[in-house]
């Protein structure tokens, strides 16, 4: 079932392509606002944060509502900078369609490719808008050639009858048959079939205009209504996703929710919590959210990524970090040491809004660490802490996020039988796994030796046990087998196996030794010919490896694998040496063994399980903080 009166779309683009300016014009032309704001002047309606207004960039996805031809459009304006890829990723969870802005002056950029192919993979229909047609150097035919080469051959200018016939007939057998039999197909029919193909994500209409001059804006609004799909809804089965957070002075934390099925009402209970208020994008209390709609829900205690109801009702998987993961960890330090606890609470709030920040808190040392995407991300966090939380902070030097694995097979043991009452005995075989294999676990112990409920606790505790290995980094690429163990029908306490699991795992890691793993980036360089030699030399100097080189049009495309620690700042160097003519994209390829002369150790954030006396006391809450403060 479709709700034809709604469209849920996102506006996406590479940096400085004019995405937020287009959003402002869509709001103005539709009558949602009287005057379009300016990104440069910090008056854009979707840039609400002080840091956005001061810098003239979007750092947070924002949802606004407008109406066109009787259709309500929920429009999500997203950041363009790669440091805020997590905001872009989470926005895709809520969408039925997307408008991808491409600068006709700059052409298809690497970020454009990444966005388009993400939509393609997630089966999100797309309309493309060639912006900046008023600019010197704008070239729609050249940009269309790039779109066909780098994005999809099924992109088409709808006003081009021959191109329309070629694309539609190639995708629609009925149109092909009519053309073969009659030698002609009416443009009206081609337009009708294009609409169906676009909504199915098989063809991609391309529009032209200038957001700054307000040219082509009505055509974009028409395209959203005509060429992007209405939401499919299931009125009987509750299903939704929290994709962003909102703070209100009186109501506290609220979650932006896209509801795919069922409905939510004020005072409705979900689990232990109750809905206190539901607002639309304008901030109005609407009292009810129905399938197909987007709104802000207060009172349920939701966090980003939480699923409401049945996960099976979501149209696509919710994978945090699928479009990019933080590769650096940085210590956040309050300039006033007396405000450390305030800083911790602020970082907890920000981590709920962006789970990839993954705040860690070492109570013993008082250190607070956040994971960040890059330098701009770190600077923006500093401004947000200052403007939103009134906290003046500084950052220690960022460190690359390493991982670790066991060097050789070993057996880890925990015998937790003293002091009574307790009884949990575990023996794990821990072996190295292939790179990229993650964590594999299974049990060879029968339920007579360790009952099922206790074995389930072992599985629950494994992520805690592997959060930090002997070098302090997350443990991965291991095969763990429970080979023996025991319980006592009188003395075993319900949580004893949760306590014993980290102890036994750390014992095995200590015996087997640790191997440091470093992140490796897959980088694609887009280079003018005169810079190819220099970049290839730089790749070698960064301990990298060139794996492919080929020519696309007037540029050379070079692909390489480079350790993250060597290349995280290289994009700035590349822009400098090429005068801005070269570009690059990078994403995490995986982890590989670090050189033997690299020794990176991370401070443990909780009691070491191998310090057994202290660990057992902490486990029994005799020490402040407990054992699971990771």
Image (cartoon, rainbow, N blue to C red):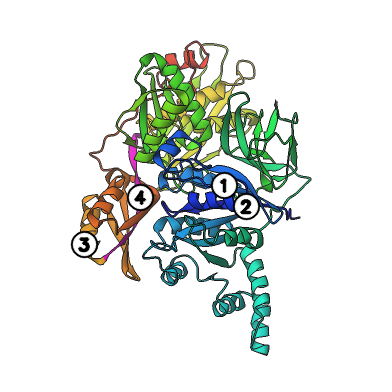
Give the foreground label among 3 and 1.
1
Instruction: Report the residue marked by disc 4.
Output: 521
Determine whether the residue tagged by mark 2 lies in a helix, strand or loop: loop
Disc 1 packing (10 Å; few <14; some 14–19; many ≥20): many
Determine whether the residue tagged by mark 3 lies in a helix, strand or loop: helix
Instruction: Measure the alpha-carbon separation of dots 3 and 1.
Output: 42 Å
Pointers 2 and 1 in contact (C-beta within 8 Å): no
Give the foreground label among 4 and 2.
2
Lower position in the chain sequence, tag 3 or tag 2: 2
Residue 414 in view = no
Does 593 sit left or right of 2 as displayed?
left
Residue 326 in view = yes
* Image point (33%, 68%), residue name: 550
| Magenta segment boundaries in residue numbering | 513-528
Instruction: Measure the alpha-carbon separation of dots 2 and 1.
Output: 15 Å
Pointers 1 and 4 in contact (C-beta within 8 Å): no
Instruction: Report the residue marked by disc 1.
Output: 76
Instruction: Report the residue marked by disc 2.
Output: 30
Determine whether the residue tagged by mark 4 lies in a helix, strand or loop: strand
Lower position in the chain sequence, tag 1 or tag 4: 1
Query: Is residue 520 covered in magenta?
Result: yes
Instruction: Measure the alpha-carbon separation of dots 1 and 4.
Output: 30 Å
Instruction: Measure the alpha-carbon separation of dots 4 and 3.
Output: 20 Å
Q: Position of residue 468 (x, y in %)?
A: 41, 30
Q: Nearer the viewer, residue 629 or 512?
A: 629
The count of marks equals: 4
Instruction: Measure the alpha-carbon separation of dots 4 and 2.
Output: 43 Å
């Amino acid at each position: 079932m479709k709700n034809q009166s709604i469209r849920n779309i996102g506006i996406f683009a590479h940096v400085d392509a004019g995405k937020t300016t287009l959003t402002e014009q869509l709001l103005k032309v539709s009558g949602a606002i009287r005057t379009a704001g300016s990104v440069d002047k910090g008056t854009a309606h979707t840039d609400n944060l002080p840091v956005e207004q001061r810098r003239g960039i979007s750092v947070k996805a924002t949802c606004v509502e407008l109406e066109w031809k009787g259709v309500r459009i929920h429009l999500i304006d997203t950041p363009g900078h790669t440091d805020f890829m997590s905001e872009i990723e989470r926005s895709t969870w809520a969408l039925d369609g997307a408008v991808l802005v491409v600068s006709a002056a700059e052409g298809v950029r690497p970020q454009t490719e990444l966005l388009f192919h993400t939509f393609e993979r997630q089966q999100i229909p797309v309309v493309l808008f060639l912006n900046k047609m008023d600019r010197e150097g704008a070239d729609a035919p050249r940009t269309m050639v790039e779109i066909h080469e780098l994005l999809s051959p099924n992109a088409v200018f709808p006003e081009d009858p021959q191109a329309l016939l070629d694309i539609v007939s190639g995708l629609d057998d009925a149109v092909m048959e009519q053309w073969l039999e009659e030698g002609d197909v009416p443009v009206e029919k081609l337009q009708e079939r294009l609409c169906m193909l676009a909504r199915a994500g098989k063809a991609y209409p391309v529009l032209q205009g200038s957001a700054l001059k307000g040219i082509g804006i009505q055509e974009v609004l028409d395209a959203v209504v005509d060429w992007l799909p209405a939401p499919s809804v299931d009125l009987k089965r509750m299903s939704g996703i929290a994709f962003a957070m909102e703070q209100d002075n009186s109501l506290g934390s609220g979650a932006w929710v896209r509801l795919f099925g069922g409905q939510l009402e004020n005072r409705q209970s979900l689990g232990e919590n109750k809905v206190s208020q539901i607002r639309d994008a304008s901030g109005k209390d609407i009292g009810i959210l129905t399938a197909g709609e987007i709104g802000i829900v207060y009172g349920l205690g939701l966090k980003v990524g939480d699923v409401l109801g049945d996960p099976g009702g979501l149209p696509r998987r919710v994978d945090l970090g699928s479009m990019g993961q933080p590769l650096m960890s940085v210590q956040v330090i309050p300039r006033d040491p007396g405000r450390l606890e305030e800083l911790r609470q602020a970082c907890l709030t920000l981590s709920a809004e962006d789970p990839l920040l993954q705040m860690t808190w070492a109570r013993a040392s008082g250190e607070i660490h956040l994971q960040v995407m890059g330098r701009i991300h770190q600077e923006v966090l500093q401004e947000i802490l200052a403007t939103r939380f009134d906290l003046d902070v500084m950052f220690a030097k960022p460190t690359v996020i390493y991982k670790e694995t066991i060097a050789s097979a070993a057996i880890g043991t925990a015998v937790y039988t003293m002091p009574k009452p307790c009884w949990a005995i575990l023996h794990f075989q821990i072996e190295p796994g292939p790179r990229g294999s993650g964590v594999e676990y299974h049990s060879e112990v029968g339920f007579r030796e360790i009952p099922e409920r206790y074995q389930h606790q072992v599985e629950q505790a494994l992520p805690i046990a592997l959060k930090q290995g002997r070098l302090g980094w997350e443990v991965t690429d291991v095969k763990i087998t429970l080979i023996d163990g025991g319980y006592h029908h009188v003395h075993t306490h319900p949580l004893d196996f949760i306590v014993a699991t980290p102890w036994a795992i750390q014992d095995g890691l200590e015996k087997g030794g640790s191997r440091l793993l470093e992140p490796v980036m897959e980088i694609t360089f887009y280079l003018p010919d005169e810079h190819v030699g220099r970049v290839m030399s730089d790749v070698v100097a960064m301990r990298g490896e060139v794996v492919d080189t080929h020519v696309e049009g007037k540029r050379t495309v070079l692909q390489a694998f480079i350790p993250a620690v060597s290349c995280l700042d290289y994009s700035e160097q590349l822009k400098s040496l090429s005068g801005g003519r070269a570009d690059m994209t990078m994403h995490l390829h995986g982890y590989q063994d670090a050189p033997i002369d690299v020794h990176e150790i991370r401070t443990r954030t909780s009691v070491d399980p191998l310090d057994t006396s202290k660990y057992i006391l902490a486990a029994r809450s005799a020490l402040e903080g407990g054992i699971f403060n990771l």
